[in-house]
Image: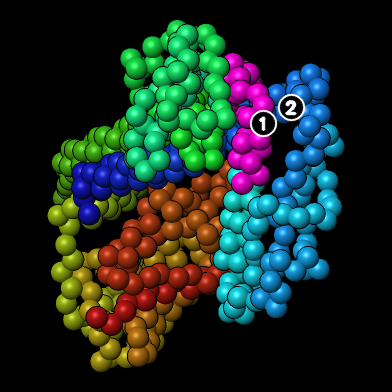
Amino acid sequence: MNTRLRFKLIAILITLSLAGLVAFQGYWLHGLYKTLYGQMEINIQEAMKNADYKEMFLRIKELKNKDVLVQHKSETISIYSDDKSNSPADSTRKRPYAVMSAQDGYKMQEHSANMQVQIDYSEENDSTPVDSTLTDYLTTIGQIENMIQRAMHMDIDSLSPIVFDNYNKFLKQELIARNIVTEHELIVAYQPEGESKAKGWMNLGSNEILKKAYKDKLPSDTTVNVPLVSDKDFSRWKDVVYFDYPIFTDNLLYYRLYLKSPSYIILKQMSGILVSSVILFILIVIAFIYLLRTILRQKTMEELKTDFTNNMTHELKTPISVSYAAVDALLNFSDSVSDKQRKYLTVVKDQLTHLTGLVEQILALAVENRSTFHLHPEEINISRLVTSLAEQYRLKAGKEVEFKLNVSDNLDVQADRTHIYNMLSNLVDNAIKYCDKEPCCIILEATKNEQEVCISVIDNGRGISETNQKHIFDKFFRVPNGNLHNTKGYGLGLYYVRDMMAKHGGTVTVESHLGKGSTFTLHFKYT
């Protein structure tokens, strides 16, 4: 995969990651918004119910102070359970739940009932889930509460009319206590029984009397005082939402609470999460942009380095070749060269040879990193390959070297001839350079099994420590040797070996002990 394609792939992955992060964060925030909105609706219903209780209790307190409740000292609401073995009229099975008393509040006592809710325990099936049973009973309890509240309304409203100003005041307190702070308007709506929509409504800011407007449609024992509360025109509000709460038993009248922009309430509650999410997203975007710019800069630098290396090595080959030819001519075709001059010319020739090899190696690395690089594998006889290599290094080693070949004559390997020769040449060259014993003993052996062909280069040199073995295949790495520089090199040979073995689909391994030598093995997998 070339550098340009790799960069595009990274950019696409980063973009997809950002898109996925935004989608997930948006989905989570939407779910949180819906949850908070649902909780707000529950809180508003609770606030309207509590305000209704408080308004009734305030009227009860005022009636007690005026001694209006002398003839109504105790109004009872009895709710009891029964089973099928006894009729509801059987007083011995009655289990009283609550009694409302105008004087004493709520207490438990036996009494005759005028409101009954029968709970039959015998109908429960053993297979009914516990959660379902709990839901049924909680629903029943809610129904009982509603019945009690409406019964209280019927009794108290007959003695004292509803004071909507007090209800509105209590409602504001309940809304603020639940952190629901926004413009709102409360009205009283009238809806005949059986109708799906309200037939009329009265703003609490109006000085009209609701009883007068609907005198033939309201309960005969109920009066309604609507004081001047506000003059807001909520019909012009945007995104207005309303909530209803019934007043009477037959649902003829109900409170309707209009809220201006309830979404603003939820967004305000989510402000901390929203701000932190936006900041986090911005930081991630900045980090991704910085990462892309860094990758792009590294890509540009890599391309500049590659171009420089290619141009430099090509430019060096010409003067090196000319210098080498001139030195060789002086050594072989000049009779006037003294022994001292010949000695220095030989040194120059050796260094030019070394420099030529280095340039060729750098060119080979540059070529194999190109996207157009391709191997040319073929069947190679390992015995002939290592024999030729050993003969070559016996001549140019510069010191005594003993080669031992443990290779079968009919053992072949599928590889690129040029690169396998260069890899083995690098390993043998390192074995000779880093051997501090004479003679330098090098063993070239090859084996095969069901999965791979292995070619090993074994020496009796100084060895490599376990710490350095982890890095010897890194580019430009050389084993530290203090301030001594008697062994020349640039740390490219073993990097080239590892890289070329990876392109062949194989691996290179090393086993080494300090003072005992090293074993480098090329593993060629069967294709």
Do the CB atoms of the residues marked 1 and 2 lie less than 8 Å apart?
yes
Magenta residue check for 443: no
Q: Give the image location of residue 486, x and y in percent.
A: 50, 49
* Mark nearer the N terminus (1 vs 2): 2
- Numbered circles on residues, count: 2
In this view of the protein, which residue sits in the foreground, 246 or 131?
246
Question: Counting other residues with Cα less than 10 Å from the Cα at mark 1, is it few (<14), some (14-19), or many (20 or more)?
Answer: many
Mark 2, residue position:
60
Dividing the image into 4 quarters, which one contains the N terminus? bottom left
Residue located at (39% from left, 66% from top): 427
Q: Which residues are magenta?
A: 147-175
> Residue 420 or 98: which is nearer the viewer?
98
Identify the element where label 1 is drawn. Answer: helix
Q: What is the spatial separation of the Cα atoms under label 1 and label 2, in whole angstroms? A: 7 Å
Residue located 21% across and 38% down the image: 307
The stretch drawn in magenta includes residue 169:
yes
Q: Position of residue 69 (x, y in %)?
A: 78, 28
Q: Main secondary structure of the magenta part?
A: helix
Which residue is depicted at the point 78% across and 32% down? 71
Which residue corresponds to the image point at 54% horizontal and 33% vertical from the top-left? 247
What amino acid type is highlighted by mark number 2?
A: Ile
Q: Is residue 259 left or right of residue 147?
A: left
Q: Which residue is mark 1?
A: 156
**Can residue 113 be seen in this snapshot?**
yes
Residue 40 in the image: state x and y as whole percent: 52, 35
Q: Nearer the viewer, residue 142 or 177?
A: 142
- Neighbor class of circle 2 (other Cα within 10 Å; few <14, some 14-19, many 20+) is some
SS for dot 2 = helix
Determine which quarter of the picture holds residue 465: bottom right
